[in-house]
Amino acid sequence: METIALAEVAAVLADPSRASMCLALLDGRAWTVTELAGAAEVAASTASEHVTKLTEAGFVVRVKQGRHSYVRIADPRVAELIEHLAQHAEHRPVKGLRSSVRVKRLEFARTCYDHLAGTVGVALRDGMLTTGLIDEADGLTLTARGREVLGALGVEIADGRRAMLRDCLDWTVRRDHLAGRVPAALLSHGVSAGWLSREGNRAVKVLPAAEKPFADLGVDLAGLRRP
DNA sequence: ATTAATGTTAGAGGGCTTGC
DNA sequence: GCAAGCCCTCTAACATTAAT
């Protein structure tokens, strides 16, 4: 029974068009069906059918707003599942200069659904551990000092049942970065505060304004090798 | 009210796999 | 080899909504 369910779920992601749509949705934004059709390079009607299948499988949710139908990842756990599958897919060698540059940018800093991943994401986990802002003695927890520093930086952590902090394996660096409400709030605030800028294809640009706040979080951005 | 944009559905075609 | 079935994709038609 479970094997049948697993096969059915896997079959939903086995289609190249649906896989392209899921990867596009990993940037955390809500996409219209037309935008997803463009991302997957299929007709809007085809995209609409794929969105229906992804919705029925629980991978995405559809929100109707006027004549638009917005689609987004249903749950952060779904995003992490897709991210982990991408980890295997990205094992293939990169061809061409443009692809190589794109991969290098993604390796340095990118979004993993709603939080920061890549070299910067991993450095953030290391830095916050080293400076005692988080603790992993009894699972990942935010320390009192961590709350204080984040509060001083203006990062407001949303309430909710989702875990505050958890590890998320990074497919480029092959080490853990932080997932959960805390890193989600940090990315959101980082973008609005002008520390970070979301580029296309999930890449994140680290702006000069990020140097000071990231130093407070134990990350020496100048010491990280940029692409 | 009309036009344009967007999304959904039905039906058909093509490619592939499977069973005979 | 051939028919049947499945899956993916497309066009065409239609419904809905926003813009003019």
Image (cartoon, coloured by chain):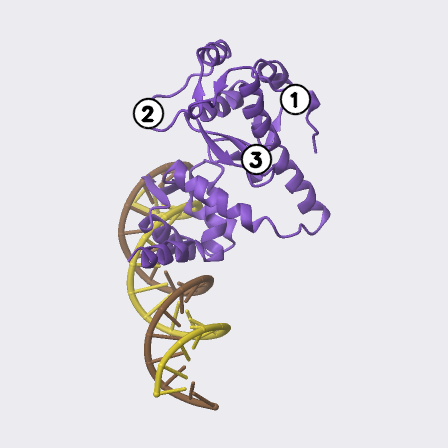
Chain colours: A purple, B yellow, C brown
- Dot 3 or dot 2: first in sequence order is 2
At numbered mark 2, what does the secondary structure look like: helix, strand or loop? loop
Under mark 1, the amino acid is Leu
Could you classify mark 2 by the number of other residues whose Cα lies within 10 Å: few (under 14), some (14-19), or many (20 or more)?
Answer: few
Under mark 2, the amino acid is Gly
Nearer mark to the viewer, of 3 and 2: 3
User: Residue A183 location in percent, x, y?
Assistant: 47, 25
User: Residue A33 location in percent, x, y?
Assistant: 42, 47
User: Residue A118 location in percent, x, y?
Assistant: 59, 34
Mark 3 and mark 1 on one chain: yes
In the picture, measured across the screen, residue A173 lies left or right of residue A69, that is right
**Residue A35 seen:** no
Q: CA distance from mark 3 to mark 2?
A: 27 Å
- Dot 1 or dot 2: first in sequence order is 2
In the picture, measured across the screen, residue A41 lies left or right of residue B4, that is right
Disc 2 target residue: A160
Chain containing mark 3: A
